[in-house]
Every structure is written in structure tokens, then in C-alpha cells.
Amino acid sequence: MGANDSPTTTRSIVTDYFDWRLNNNRTITDNRLFLLVRQIGPECEASYHVQQPAFNMLFSSPTVDLQTLNNIRHFHRELANELFNGGVMKWAYIITFISWSAVIAERTLQQLQQPQGINSLSPDTIISSIIDWTTDYIDTDLAAWLQSQNYWDGCLKKFDNRVQRRNSIGRGMAILGTIGMFTLGALYMRRT
């Protein structure tokens, strides 16, 4: 499972995030959108943990049965329904969905490693199935909203502007700090 930097499709974004997440953040890319999703995914996931403690408890419960593809798919669908049931759409929800889908894959792979774990499913089958379901849900169920946002270019524009604003503010503060230091230095030199 390798991430393809071009073209930027939902599948390539989801595949890259899974690859990055499941390989302990060791994959490299220069695709700005992939990097953005990698940066924002864990933030969105942590925020959702705080906002939805009931679902969180269900997810962290050892009784969640991820032993068959049908069970995994059902749980994945529950996650999607939970995230998108309010009718309010945001890029953060989509990125959270991608991130939590990767968490489902991690959790399933962990169960696979248990002595009583899944024996009939290969890790590649599990990962590719969850990538397929995630991609299909986003591209099908959220298609109208994605189109209204100019697809993934809209996501890049929204979050890239936020990062650029943050960088501009940082540069502005650095410039003001430098000017302040020169001013203080000049005042000090005048006094002596």
C-alpha cells in the first residue's frame, strides 16, 4: 500500500493517511494536501474524542467485535453515521472520518495479532477494505457537498489559508519584536 501523490483524489488522500498512520508516521510526501490531512487528522480525532465520549467508550470497549469484514464494515458505517448525522458538514468532519477509519484499521490489526484474533483475514484485506469504504462514503454520500466546496481544492484552500495566516502572524510578530529591540537599543544608547 503506497500513497500516490498525483492526482489528488479522495482515494489517494485516504490511502496516504492510512499508510502514514499505520507505518508510525514514517512515510514521506511533498503533497501539500496530504501533509495538511496528516497534520489536521490527529487534531480532529482528539477533538472528537472530547466531543463524543459515548461513542468513544463504545470504540475503546474490548467487546467491539471486529472479527469479520461484515462487523468491521458495520462499525465503520456507525462511525460515519455518528459523524455526519447532524446534517452539518465541515472539512474537519471528513478529515476526522479519515482519521477514525485509520484507527478502526489499527484496532482491527491489533485484534488480528491476539491469540484468539481474526484468522481468516489478511492485514492487506482489512486495510484495503476500510480504505474502500471510507473513500466510497466520502465520494458517494458526501458528493454534493464536496462539489459545492470545489472538491479537495476547497479543503486545501481553507486550511492552507489558516496555516498561511498563522505563519504571517508569526512573521509579523518577529518583525515587531525586532523593531522593538532596535527601538529599545536606540533609547538605551541615547541615555548613555
Image (spheres, rainbow, N blue to C red):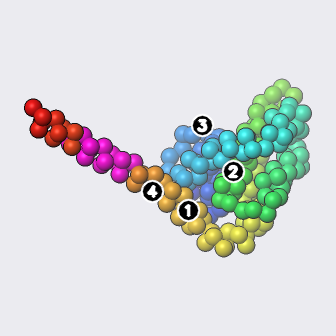
Gap between marks 1 and 4 measured at Cα: 10 Å
Vertical placement of residue 31 versus 56, above or below: below
Segment tinted magenta in the rendering: 170-182
Mark 2, Cα crowd under 10 Å, few <14 / some 14-19 / many 20+, is: many
Q: Nearer the viewer, mark 2 or mark 1?
A: 1
Residue 19: within the magenta? no
Specify the label residue 96 is tagged with.
2
Q: Residue 47: image x %, image y %? A: 68, 44
Tell me, yes or no, if residue 68 can be seen here: yes
Query: Can you identify the residue that label 1 sits on?
Result: 158
Taking depth in this image into account, of 16 and 60 the one nearest to the observer is 60
Residue kind at label 1, given as amino acid type: Lys
Query: Can you identify the residue that label 4 sits on?
Result: 164
Dot placed on the residue nearer the N-terminal end, 2 or 4? 2
Q: Nearer the viewer, mark 2 or mark 3?
A: 2
Taking depth in this image into account, of 57 and 131 the one nearest to the observer is 57
Query: Can you identify the residue that label 3 sits on?
Result: 24
Residue kind at label 2, given as amino acid type: Thr
